[in-house]
Amino acid sequence: MAAIIISKNVELTQKIIDQLKTCYDPEIPVDVWELGLIYEINLSDDNDLLVRFTLTSPNCPAVETLPAEMESKIKEISELKSVKMELTFEPTWTKEMMSEVAQVELGFM
């Protein structure tokens, strides 16, 4: 499942994705973008950002740190007016949501 991107600003959206790619699941050596943990990037015309994301499981030990790390990295982008992070477990994350890059890195392909 690819992330839903709602944005007219391609350059700023790429900056957001690049920042997300610096955040790694502590148990899996792959970034959150390639893992398919980002479900939606919604950037308004006023540069208000909503990122809808999940974790590999509701019991993920990174629940206390990973969302805060992602939000902190995204907030480094000066063009953004506001950042809202929304954690969801619908749909449930599965390994099929990973990119081909991630699946190759983890030996699934």
Image (tube, helix red, strand yellow):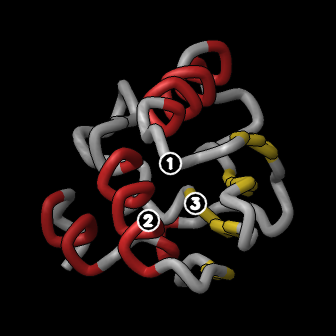
Front residue (pair 38, 107):
38
Q: CA distance from mark 1 to mark 2?
A: 8 Å
Above or below, comparing residue 5 to residue 43 in the picture: below
Looking at the picture, which amino acid does disc 1 mark?
A: Glu
Front residue (pair 106, 12):
12
Q: Mark 3 or 2 closer to N-term?
A: 2
Q: Where in the figure is residue 4, as x and y percent of width and height?
A: 64, 81
Looking at the picture, which amino acid does disc 2 mark?
A: Leu
Q: Is residue 78 left or right of residue 26?
A: right
User: Which residue is label 2 attached to?
Assistant: 12
Quarter in which the N terminus is drawn:
bottom right
Residue extending farthest to the top is 64
Foreground tag (3 vs 2): 2
User: Which residue is label 3 attached to?
Assistant: 38
Front residue (pair 9, 1):
9
- The image quarter containing residue 10 is bottom left
At horizontal 62% and vertical 80% (from top left) the residue drawn is 7
Q: Where in the figure is residue 62, as x and y percent of width and height?
A: 56, 22
- The image quarter containing residue 57 is top right
Foreground tag (1 vs 3): 1
Q: Mark 1 or 3 closer to N-term?
A: 3
Q: Residues within 10 Å of mark 1 (few under 14, many from 20)?
A: few
Looking at the picture, which amino acid does disc 3 mark?
A: Ile
Residue 79: mark: 1
